[in-house]
Image (cartoon, helix red, strand yellow):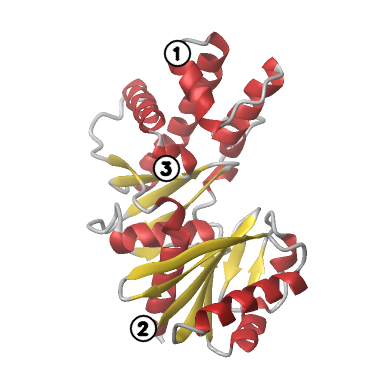
C-alpha cells in the first residue's frame, strides 16, 4: 500500500509511488495542453501503477496559491488551466481515493523538514531560486502560509524602486541577460563557470545576481531570525553559487552591523524529488490531523 504523488511543473508532470519509506517508479510526462488532457494523463499513470500497487491516496504538488480549504488553486501560474475551479473534488472523483494538494515550493520545504536539511530544525526558511524567487516559511515545523496564502512569496519583495527580488535574484533571468547582451545561448551553470574563469561581463552579471539573492536572504533573516535558510532550485546543486551567495550575505551583514546573528545556510537535500516527497508528507500529515 502506498501513495501516488504528482508534481505539476511548467513543462512536465513528474510522478512517483511512495511505499515503504521510499519513492519508486519516478518518471514524467510532457505537460498536457489543457485540463481534459491533463486528467487523461493523470488517470493513465494511476491505472498503470494500480496494476502493481495498492494505491491508498494521491498527493499533488502544484504551482499557485493552493487552497485546500475550498479545494481550489488560486492565483496564477505557468499552468493557467488548473486554477479557479474545484480541482481537488474532480481529482477525488477521477481516482476514487483521497486526494491532497499543496503548493510546489511548500512541498519541497516539507520534504526538507521531514527527512532533509531541516529535519533537526524547528524554524527555517526555504528559499527557491529559478525563473523567479519563491519559497516557504516553516515555524515550529509547520508551514506558515499567511492569511491570503502569500507566506513564502519572497519574490514579490522590492529591492529598489523598480525591481523585485524575482527580477534581480533569478538565475534564469541573469543567464537571459548575458545571452541578450552577447547574442549567445549559454545554459544556466555556464554563466557561473564563465564568471569564475574571469569573463568580465559574466562576472558583472553573476555578481549582481549574488548580491540580489543575498540581499533577499538578509531581509528575511532580520525579519524572521529563523536560524536556518535552505536554498532550493537548480543553483542549489552548484557549490560555487552557494558559496558566493554566502560570501555576499556575510558582507551585507557586516555592512549593516548585524554581527550577533547566528544562522546557517544549507543546500536542499532532495533536489528534483523534493516536490514529490513533500507532497507525500503533506498527504500523510493531513490524514493524521483529521
- Front in this rendered view, residue 26 or 216: 26
Q: Tell whether 58 sits left or right of 172.
A: left
Where residue 198 appears, as percent x and y from the top left, is 47, 10
Q: CA distance from mark 2 to mark 1?
A: 52 Å
Q: Which quadrant of the figure contains the C terminus?
A: bottom left
Disc 2 is placed on an element classified as helix
Position above or below: 112 against 177: below
Q: CA distance from mark 1 to mark 3?
A: 31 Å
Q: In the rendered structure, which disc, 2 or 1, sits on the residue that comes first in sequence?
A: 1
Position above or below: 136 against 67: above
For label 1, the crowd category at 10 Å Cα-Cα, with few meaning under 14, some 14 to 19 and many 20 or more, is few
**Residue under label 2:** 288
For label 2, the crowd category at 10 Å Cα-Cα, with few meaning under 14, some 14 to 19 and many 20 or more, is few
Where residue 284 appears, as percent x and y from the top left, is 39, 78
Q: CA distance from mark 2 to mark 3?
A: 31 Å
Q: Which quadrant of the figure contains the N terminus?
A: bottom left
Please count the marks in the image.
3
Q: In the rendered structure, which disc, 2 or 3, sits on the residue that comes first in sequence?
A: 3
- Residue at image position (40%, 39%) is 237
Position above or below: 230 against 54: above
Residue farthest front in this picture: 51
**Residue under label 3:** 220
Residue 131: quadrant of the picture = top right
Tag nearer the camera, 2 or 3: 2
Find residue 197 and name its label: 1
Where residue 80 appears, as percent x and y from the top left, is 74, 60
Amino acid at each position: 500500500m502506498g501513495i501516488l504523488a504528482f508534481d505539476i511543473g511548467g513543462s512536465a508532470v513528474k510522478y512517483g509511488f511512495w511505499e515503504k519509506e521510499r519513492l519508486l517508479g519516478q518518471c514524467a510526462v510532457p505537460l498536457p495542453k489543457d485540463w481534459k488532457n491533463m486528467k487523461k494523463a493523470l488517470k493513465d499513470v494511476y491505472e498503470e501503477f494500480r496494476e502493481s500497487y495498492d494505491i491508498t491516496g494521491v498527493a499533488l504538488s502544484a504551482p499557485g496559491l493552493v487552497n485546500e480549504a475550498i479545494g481550489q488553486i488560486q492565483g496564477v501560474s505557468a499552468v493557467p488551466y488548473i486554477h479557479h475551479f474545484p480541482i481537488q473534488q474532480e481529482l477525488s472523483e477521477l481516482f476514487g481515493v483521497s486526494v491532497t494538494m499543496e503548493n510546489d515550493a511548500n512541498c519541497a520545504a516539507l520534504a526538507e523538514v521531514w527527512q532533509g536539511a531541516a529535519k533537526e530544525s524547528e524554524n527555517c526558511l526555504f528559499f527557491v531560486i529559478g525563473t523567479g524567487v519563491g519559497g516557504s516559511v516553516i515555524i515550529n515545523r509547520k508551514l506558515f502560509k499567511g492569511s491570503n496564502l502569500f507566506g513564502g512569496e519572497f519574490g514579490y519583495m522590492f529591492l529598489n524602486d523598480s525591481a523585485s527580488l524575482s527580477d534581480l535574484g533569478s538565475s534564469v533571468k541573469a543567464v537571459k541577460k548575458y545571452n541578450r547582451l552577447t547574442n549567445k545561448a549559454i545554459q544556466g551553470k555556464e554563466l557561473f563557470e564563465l564568471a569564475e574563469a574571469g569573463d568580465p561581463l559574466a562576472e558583472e552579471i553573476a555578481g549582481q545576481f549574488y548580491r540580489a539573492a543575498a540581499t533577499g536572504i538578509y531581509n528575511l533573516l532580520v525579519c524572521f531570525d529563523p536560524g536556518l535558510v535552505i536554498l532550493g532550485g537548480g543553483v542549489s546543486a552548484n557549490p560555487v553559487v552557494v558559496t558566493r551567495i554566502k560570501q555576499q550575505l556575510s558582507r551585507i551583514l557586516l555592512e549593516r552591523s548585524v554581527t550577533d546573528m547566528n544562522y546557517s545556510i544549507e543546500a536542499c537535500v532532495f533536489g528534483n524529488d523534493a516536490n514529490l516527497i513533500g507532497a507525500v508528507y503533506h498527504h500523510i500529515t493531513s490524514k493524521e490531523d483529521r
